Amino acid sequence: MIVIHGKLKRIIPYRLVYWPTEALLKELAEYLPLTHYARLESANTDLDRGRCIVGHHLSLTLLINLQRPMGEIYKGLIDNARIRIHKAEKLGSRLTIRRYRGGPDEDRLVDQFVGLYNDFVRGKPSQTAPVAAAREYRFFPNADLIMAYLDGRPICGHLNLVDREAGIARLQDSANQRFHDSTTARLAGIVNVYLHWYELEKYREEGLATYDFGSIGQVEDSVGVNRFKMQFGGTIIREHNYLLAGMPVVWRSLFDLLSLASSRGQRRARVHRAGERWRYMPPERIRQTIETSIDHYQRNRQARRGGGDNSSTLSNRVALDLNLSPAASSKEKHGKASQRI
């Protein structure tokens, strides 16, 4: 479990909790000081009542089991991902990777990542917003920033949350130069795949049991992201996310206003509503639904380009890693075991 404390606008105390235990969730759902609020992410507990609950939505995420041999993980990749990894390796000394895990940031890697991220999100303003370096630094020492450089210039970066006690790393923020010129965008796509592969290798070597790709999108503009993540294989699971506040009525009204006032707020509301469709859907049906949307997305892209799709559908190419077995300690620390999909 990771707990991050802060103050909204330097005034309102809050806590951000990842992988909360069932005991902590139930405690906070019943009691928070009047002026406090909390966000609890990636919970395994479906809690339907609590005095302080402002919002509760279901989401999906994609897990890679790192307790398997690397050869088996590699076989779970689709062909295109393997091709990109090999292309990145052929870049040789042009491609370098640097890592920051907390402490003095003498080379200002966080600033470099923030610059890359904010440039990246300008390409999709309705989905996400720029970040500040202060916000990213708050994740450390529970984070791991891995940056990739092409010819000495940052081209891709991932900020991962890491709970070493539970043996899990989760993608928190990702950025690359996908919205630059066509040559840079193509190389950024290659390096982005390679950087995830690099992380899978490193985290496995360091004894972590699970790599979490972060949420699988649930609305129409996230299908491309789903397509990217699912090329690595993996297992889809349900997870629960909560917003809690000492004055729930006030916060509920505030978030209702925010959902009307901006495109990002409206999109966030759609995401939360969309999550309900997965609550009672059979596991295999969830996977089939997501894979079907990705297949349609790929065919539409090919049609716009005026060419046929010579590859097999994603549903035939994505490995079904249905034998995920997270570390026993993860189940104990994170509450009820998640339903595997």
Image (cartoon, rainbow, N blue to C red):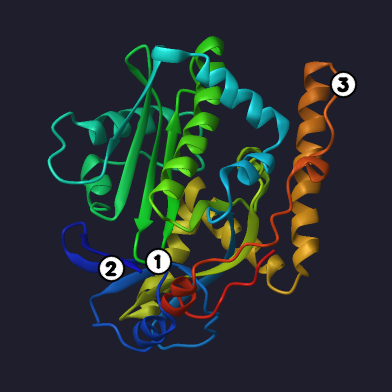
Residue 62, image x, y percentages: 59, 54
Check disc 3: other Cα within 10 Å, few if <14, some if 14-19, many if 20+. few
Quadrant the C terminus occupies:
bottom right
Q: Give the answer, above or below, for where 39 lies relative to 218.
A: below
The answer to whether residue 123 is above or below residue 238 is: above
Question: Could you say where residue 158 lies in the image, as x and y percent from the top left?
Answer: 40, 38
**What residue lies at 19% left-to-right and 31% top-to-bottom?**
108
Camera-nearest label, 1 or 2:
1
Cα separation, mark 1 vs mark 2, equals 20 Å
Among the two numbered marks 2 and 3 on one chain, the one whose residue lies closer to the N terminus: 2
Secondary structure under badge 3?
A: loop
Q: Position of residue 251 (x, y in %)?
A: 37, 72
Kind of residue at badge 2:
Arg
Residue that mark 1 sits on:
166
Q: Quadrant of residue 60?
A: bottom right
Q: Amino acid at mark 3?
A: Gly
Q: Amino acid at mark 1?
A: Ala
Residue shown at 82% from the left, 31% from the top = 299
Among the two numbered marks 1 and 2 on one chain, the one whose residue lies closer to the N terminus: 2
Q: Identify the residue under disc 3.
A: 308
Counting residues from the N terminus, which is met first, the one under dot 1 or under dot 3? Answer: 1
Q: Quadrant of the N terminus?
A: bottom left
Residue at the spot x=53%, y=14% of the render? 90
On residue 15, the disc is 2
What label sits on residue 21 in the rendered view?
A: none
Q: Give the percent coordinates (x, y) of residue 204.
A: 46, 49
Q: Residue at x 50, y 37 (%)?
A: 196
* Above or below for 118 versus 35: above
